[in-house]
Image (tube, helix red, strand yellow):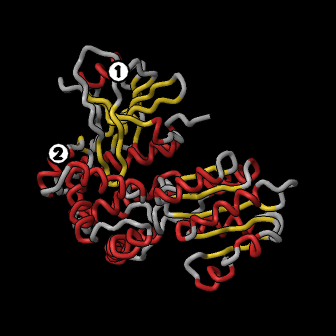
Amino acid sequence: MLISRSAHHQEVAGLLREVPVVAILGARQVGKTTLARSIARRWRGPSVTFDLEDPRDVARLADPMLALSDLTGLVVLDEIQHRPELFPSLRVLADRRPTRTRFLVLGSASPELVRRSAESLAGRIAYLQLPPLTLDEVGPARLERLWRRGGFPRSFVARTEASSSGWRRQFVATFLERDLPELGFRTPPSTIRRFWGMLAHYHGQTLNSSELARAFGVADTTIRRHLETLEATFVIRLLRPYHANLAKRQVKAPKVYIADSGLLHTLLALESQDDIEGHPKVGASWEGFLLENVCQVMRARPDQCYFWATHGGAELDLLVIQGSKRIGFEFKRNTAPSITPAMRSALTDLALSRLYVVHAGTESFALDRRVEAVAAARITRDLPRAR
């Protein structure tokens, strides 16, 4: 099954026209290399790829200025997190005039990678975070499959449910035992596995670091370090709370989500659709899955996405702020949503431009003047897109 990622292809191509260095960051196995190969094939001019997990390419780059200075066209550096010391050389090459070479670097975004690239290439580099496959890319007819299996390409396209589940279990093991240590994280894999599994049970809930610390018998600072590790490698999302200027007491802790629904189901040991539908976390799984897809449809950056809740019970699953517009979203695992008092409170207190209730039915329809029920399978058609 071939799935086009044309929107990301166009975005990267556009960035390469504007700046000399573009970084595609994202979780392991999310499709960064496949996307880069597609871009290289269509590049008008020469292109060359270095795989920094290949000892032969590492040897070629022992003297990076010697290896790279005569190259023109597009140069792809895959798994750049293994050689962040290349960034100073890229700065020198990017500053040549006229510009002879564009660099496309791929990485699993360790904090060290981002820090070094920002220091060496300020003003010369643009970033694109590649997410797992979205509904926009696989089509509305595959919504349930995408929710069940998640958006990692090999999990999604696997021939059987058993092979998809097996791939995700192997991903979890490899991520913990190989990828995290290679990125410089020293916490024992068994500890992070227990912590990640515990977060799966908190999926969609407000984070209580002190409660987690007591459960693990560690300090709050250790919990924050584990969270930073998993967020930095794109396997969890921390959704920040929004604080309106109100007299009401508002929730100030973030919500935590496993970033990919397939990984969530693996961490919860849910093998089939029946397992998912019968689990207490089914509503939270649906919410997190749609939240990720809505953020992609809206082209909403992490710093534009919030949730909102008061201690009195009013809440909003997702608030997207883009310029002067405040757009709210509620996610319901039912087919006949209605307006609730909490929604009316969010409309008023947050001065929302629109509120969308994304549901499991098949039709989209108006609920009120500023409130619309949108079928999950129709979000790519019925939700507004960033201009």
Residue 90 is drawn in which quadrant? Answer: bottom right
Say which residue appears at 66% left-offset and 75% top-offset. 50
Label 1: which residue?
A: 244
Label 2: which residue?
A: 210
The number of numbered discs placed on residues in the rendered structure image is: 2
| In the foreground, 310 or 78 | 78
Q: Residue 156 location in percent, x, y?
A: 43, 67
Task: Tell me if 297 is positioned left or right of 212 in this view.
Answer: right
Q: Residue 92 location in percent, x, y?
A: 75, 58
Q: Is residue 340 above or below residue 276?
A: above
State which mark lies toward you, 1 or 2.
2
Say which residue appears at 24% left-offset and 41% top-offset. 206
Q: In this view, does 35 lie above or below 66?
A: above
Identify residue type, mark 1: Ala
| In the foreground, 310 or 152 | 310
Task: Tell me if residue 99 can be seen.
Answer: yes
Say which residue appears at 36% left-offset and 77% top-offset. 163
**Crowd tier of the residue under label 2, counting other residues whose Cα lies within 10 Å: few below 14, some 14–19, many 20 or above:** some
Identify residue type, mark 2: Ser
Residue 369 is drawn in which quadrant? Answer: top left
